[in-house]
Image: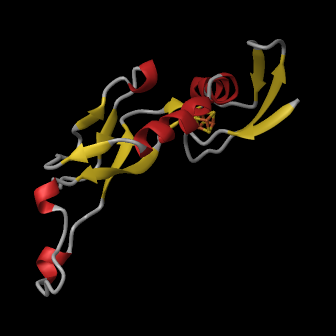
Amino acid sequence: MEEMICITCPMGCHLSIQRLSASEIAITGNRCAQGEAYAREELLSPKRVVTTTCSIAVPKANAGPKAGDRNQASLYRPRRVPVRTKTAFPKERVPELLSILAGIEVALPVRRGQILVADALGSGVDVIATRTM
Ligand code: SF4
């Protein structure tokens, strides 16, 4: 018997889970159907919203401040674009996704909510920018 707490709402029901087979579980302790759905997803196909940052593609002609440049505005150049998956992504594939996101460069300008990677790894989940830059 496994125990978990449903975090879907503030009630925080204590769920007891009995594994019947590799794909079947019996859940008790939930006060509503959402608790059962939560436990099934968490135990059988867990998903997480993934947040990280991606590199910004810097045009070669604009590669950075020159030596001796004292203009603070020109010295500030954001180096990373914050991104996240638009919806929850399969947990077991998160390392694979992070590896791909670590290798991409985003061309500016970018808008908050803009899709940067569509259908990441064939999951049906898009990766979006979370900031306009
Ligand atoms: S089982 Fe239902 S009532 Fe209980 S914490 Fe989950 S969502 Fe809330």
Above or below 77: residue 101 = above
**What residue is shown at x 30% (from left), y 39% (from top)?**
128
Question: In the figure, is residue 50 to the left or right of 38?
Answer: left
**What residue is shown at x 35% (from left), y 47% (from top)?**
83
Whether residue 123 appears in this view of the structure is no
x then y, percent, for residue 96: 54, 34
Q: Nearer the viewer, residue 59 or 4?
A: 59
**What residue is shown at x 44% (from left), y 47% (from top)?**
51
Whether residue 81 appears in this view of the structure is yes
Q: Nearer the viewer, residue 74 or 121?
A: 74
Question: In the figure, is residue 46 to the left or right of 72?
Answer: right
Residue farthest along the right direction in this orientation:
1
Q: Quarter-wise, where is residue 19 in the image?
A: top right
Above or below 56: residue 19 = above
x then y, percent, for residue 79: 29, 61
x then y, percent, for residue 16: 80, 31
